[in-house]
Image (tube, rainbow, N blue to C red):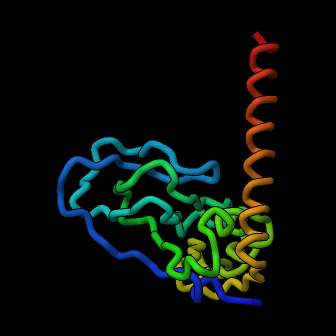
Amino acid sequence: MIYKLGDLTEQRREKYSGGELPICGVSKDGIIPPKQQEADISIYNVLYHNDFIFNPARMELNSIALNDNYDKAICSSLYEIFYVKESSLVLPDYLQMIVKTDNFRRFCAFVGSGSVREYCRYANIAEYPIDLPSMERQKELVRYSRIIDDRIKLKQKINDNLAV
C-alpha cells in the first residue's frame, strides 16, 4: 500500500529546557559532532532515539539520519526532526533505508529548487510517496541491509590495514 511519509511520521518540535545532553549535527554520512562548539544551545531542539534529524538546507545532499546513537540529545534549531508515529506500519530502520535512496534525494532536490537557498522542509518531505511492504518483509530487508553494511565496514577495515 502507498502512503505519504507524513501519514507515517510526525514532526517533533520540542525545545531544549536545560540539563546535560549530547549535542549532535547531521551530514550525508549520518549523525556527527557539532561544527560550532560555542553556540547558544538555549534555542536547540530535542531529539530522541529513533527520531530522524535533517538539515533542510542540505537535503539535496541527503543530510538526514536516524538517531540510533542517543536516548536523548539536542541539535541546532536550524535542523528539523520527525519520528515514526505509525510503528505498526513502518520500522524506523526501514524508513531510514528509504530516505537514503537516490529517489528520495532527487525528490528533495526537486522540491527545494527554484529559490536562492534550496530548503526542503518537513512539510515538503511529508508528501513523499512510500510503497510499504509487510512488516515481515521490512524486517527481512533491514536485516539484509545490516549484513551488507557490516561486510562493507569489515572490507574497509581490511583495506585500511593493507594501506599502512
Q: Classify residue 125 by image quadrant.
A: bottom right
Q: Can you see residue 105?
A: no
Q: Position of residue 6 (x, y in %)?
A: 57, 86
In this rendering, the answer to whether 139 lies above or below 85 is above
Q: Nearer the viewer, residue 118 or 93?
A: 93
Q: Residue furthest front?
A: 136
Tell how many labels.
0
In this rendering, the answer to whether 65 lies above or below 87 is above
Q: Can you see residue 94?
A: yes
Q: Which quarter shows the N terminus?
A: bottom right
Q: Residue at x 68, y 78 (%)?
A: 113
Q: Residue furthest top?
A: 164
Q: Residue at x 71, y 74 (%)?
A: 135
Q: Nearer the viewer, residue 36 or 164?
A: 164
Q: Classify residue 87 by image quadrant.
A: bottom right
Looking at the image, residue 70 sits to the left or right of residue 131; the answer is left
Q: Classify residue 118 by image quadrant.
A: bottom right
Q: Which quarter shows the C terminus?
A: top right
Q: Position of residue 151 (x, y in %)?
A: 80, 37
In this rendering, the answer to whether 34 lies above or below 96 is above
Q: Nearer the viewer, residue 110 or 62?
A: 62
Q: Residue at x 71, y 63 (%)?
A: 97
Q: Residue at x 75, y 89 (%)?
A: 2
Looking at the image, residue 159 sits to the left or right of residue 68; the answer is right
Q: Nearer the viewer, residue 54 or 14?
A: 14
Looking at the image, residue 69 sits to the left or right of residue 111; the answer is left
Looking at the image, residue 109 sits to the left or right of residue 51; the answer is right
